[in-house]
Each structure stands twice: as structure tokens, then as C-alpha cells.
Image (spheres, grey):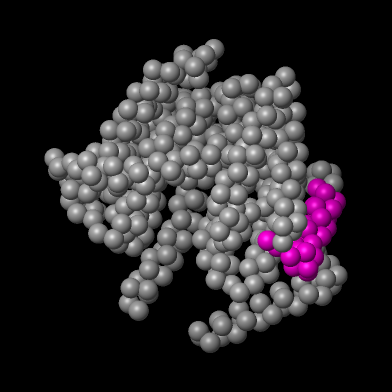
Amino acid sequence: MGKTISVLNSSSWTLGVKFVERGVSLAIYIMLARFLSVEEFGVVAFAMLFLEFITVIISSGVKDFILTRKEVNNIFIDTCTFSVVLVSILVSLIFYLVMDLFFINKSDLMQDVFKVLLFLPAISSFNIVQTALLQRNFSFKSLSLRNLLSTLVAGIISVYCAFDDYGAWALVIYQYCKVIIDTIILQVIVKYRPGLTFSFTYFKECYKFSIPLLGSEIMNFWSTRMMDLFVSIIHGAGSLAILNISRKFTRLIQQLSLTSLRPVVLSYASKSANKSKAFAKFISYITFMIAPVLIAIGVYAEFYVTTIFGQQWEPAVSIVEILSFTAIAQCLSWYFGLILISQGKNILLFKLNVIFISAFILTGLLCYKLDFYEYIAVQAVVINLISIYKIYFLVRHEYMLFSDFKDYIVPSIFSCIIFVCSSLFFRKFLELNFYDSEWISIALSILFSLVGFVLSSIISMLSFRVFSKDIKDNLFKAVLKQKRRV
């Protein structure tokens, strides 16, 4: 019982600190965006795209291997540490040797930045094993505070460097400071010093466990980065920077809501006697609550992007607006994989993911002659089509019953459509510009978003009886539970 309370306490700490850390990270990101040019931002963004891919290759499966092992000893830890470090050095060396393939016709600055950043994986590789050891002991509080501290210190240093005209190197300094501070803190917390022991038996066990997961992790990575890759290669680093700025708020909302709820959704729905209804409810509530936020980010983009990030990011406004058209579809299909996993259809999920990623690759190849904005518009259409197909597939094969889809998901879609209409109406009012302050526009955008959400919610609940009853019952249970705690 004590252990359970400790885990719950650590989890609440993790969630709370994560919100604070994301807020600090966003503030730093905004200040750097205001100080740096579009090209400088894009240079580091392009280099980091490949650095993140290297990290995926290095860490795939190793952390899970440590977490799932019943017992660990010094020899085992030393073996995992040396394995990860050696593999990181090897992979970085390979990327250094073939970097001309990725940086052909790119600027000298971009190549220099990538060469310098190639040392990062070797440093961060020490953190993989130590982070896993802390997670084994449920030390989520220490991990969360470490991340917050390293983000804050590295952010202050990098913002000063950006203010002092370091340009793209300010972002490089941020990455190094964060990783080095993370490593130092982990050394102090874990109190582990690598020995000189190495076991080939543990080494083979580790990579026998890890390699099968590598393909899946690589596919997951590029499924979320495919647009970044094509934009950077075809349209340049500046366009990649604009794309990153365009998705900053959207990704923040997704990370704090949709991604954070994944383990909760899978755990609850998998244990439910009626998986179809359980997943339909989760998808319905997610779409009902989160999709309007993502829609509002796009509808009111022209009133906040340049005010917050700076005038040089005005081209991002159109991209934010285009991508907001995918908000409803992405919320509806976000837990598609979890539904199949809960049914034990892992192989089917793998095959479908291959098809979906192939569709994005093919789209990118066919659109190489289009300009940046046209390419994003086409990708938005493809995202919507694939998302719609995912929902159709679930209903068609009865992983989700049509009756549950009709009772719970249709009302959420209807509510989002009403929200879109009201938001477009309110935007017309904002465009009249009766005031001088840009911050008033932002405040009114937030106010109109809240009014639009309340309006769409009321209309939806009046129009759909089952949906309305379920929400009222859940609200009543939540209030009753809260009163019992008090």
C-alpha cells in the first residue's frame, strides 16, 4: 500500500513539474525565436532532426530492457552503459561519414552546426541507463526536477547568447548545456560510476531484446517527422523553422493532453468489459475537449503569432491555419493504435503503419514541385483522409461498434463543427480592429474561444440525448467524489 501511495505521489509530482517545465521551455523558445532569424532557427532545427533520429537508434529498447528486468547488478549496468556509449559513437561516426548525402547544397553553417552537435549523442548516452535506473525505483520526482532545472539554466544561458548575437550557435549552446547539466545531476542522484566490467552474455540479451523494437521505433519517429524531412530537403531550413513555429502550440497541447493520457486510456479501456464503448467515450471526450483548442490555435493565428514570436514569423500564420484543418481528424484517430493493441492486433497495426507511412512518403515525392504552402495543404488533406480511414476501419471491422460511434463520437464532431462556425464569426469581429493593442486581440481571442466552446457544448448536449446524459453522469460522479474527499 505504501509503495502504491509513493508511486501515485511521484506521478502527481511528475505531472505538476511537467506543466511547469513545459511553460519554462515555451518561454525560452519564444525568446529565442524573437532574437534569431528564420534561417538561423532552421539551421539548428534541420541538424536536430537527425540528432533526434540518432537518439532513437541508440536508446530503442535498451531502457525498456532495464525496466523490465527483475534484477540488475553492477556488471549488468556497466554492460548496458558501455554498449549504449559505444553504439552512440559508432552511429555518430557513420552519420559524420555520410553527412554529405543529407547536407548537399546546404550552407557551411548548417554543416558546421551538425558536426558540433554530433558529440551530443555520446554525452546523452550516459543518461539512458541512469534514467532507467531511477524509473525502476519510481524516482519520478527527481527526474522531473532535474529536467526543470536543466531547462531553466540552459535556457537562461542560451537566451543571453542569442541576445549577444551568437545566432544559431545560441541554440547549439542550449542543447549542450541541457545535456551536460542533465548528466551531472543524474551522476549525483544515481551515484553510479561505470566500472571496467563487461558481459557479452548481457550484451547479447540486451540487443536481442532491443533490435526487434528498433524498426517499430524508427517507423514511429518518421511517421511524426516525415513532413519535417520533406520540408527541409525540398524547401530549405527556413521553411522548416516556419513549420516548427507553426506547430509549437499545437504540439504543446498534444503532449500535455493526448500523449499524456495514452497510458491511462490503454490501461482503463483494456480492462473494460466493453472495449468498444470505453474507447468511443475516450475518443469522444478527447475530441470534444481538445479539438476546439487546436482549432482555435489556427483560427486566431493572425492575432497572436507575430505578437508572441516576432514579426519575422508572419509566414507561419498561413501554415498554422492550414494545419488546424486536421485538428478534428487527429483527435479522432490519435488512439487508433491503442485500440488494436488492446485487441492483440500488433502485427495488423504494424502492417497498417507501413501503409500509412508509405502514403506520406509517396505524397512527399509527388509534391516536390509544389511550393511550401501547397505542400502543407496537400499533407493536411492526406492526414485527414488517413485519419478518416482509421475510424472507418475500426467501425468496419467492429473494433468499435457503430452504435457507440453514433452515440458518442458523432456528437463530438458536431460540437467541433459548431465551434468552427462560431470561431469564424468571432474572427470577423476581431478583423474590424476597433482597438490599438495587439494584446487585446489575444485576450479577445481567448475569450471568444471560451464563449464558442460553451455555445457549441450547449447545442450539442441539447441535440444528443445519450451524449448529454453521459456527460452529466460523469460530472455528477466527479463532484460527488470530490465532496467525499473533502
Identify which residue is drawn at 32% across, 33% down: 87
Q: Residue at x 47, y 49 (%)?
A: 24
Q: Which residues are magenta?
A: 399-427
The quadrant in which residue 477 appears is bottom right
Q: Is residue 261 visible?
A: no
Q: Quadrant of the N terminus?
A: bottom left
> Residue 16, image x and y in percent?
46, 61
Q: Position of residue 176 (x, y in %)?
A: 35, 34
Is 139 placed left or right of 475 in the picture?
left
Estimate the x, y position of residue 219 in percent, counting from the top left: 53, 39
Residue shown at the point (26%, 42%) measured from the top left: 203
The one nearer the camera, 175 or 378, is: 378
Q: Is residue 173 left or right of residue 191?
A: right
Q: Left or right of 73: which side holds 316?
A: right
Residue 394, image x, y percentages = 70, 56
Q: Is residue 407 magenta?
A: yes
Is residue 226 in view from this perspective? yes
- Dominant SS in magenta: helix
Q: Residue furthest left?
A: 196
Q: Nearer the viewer, residue 17 or 28?
A: 17
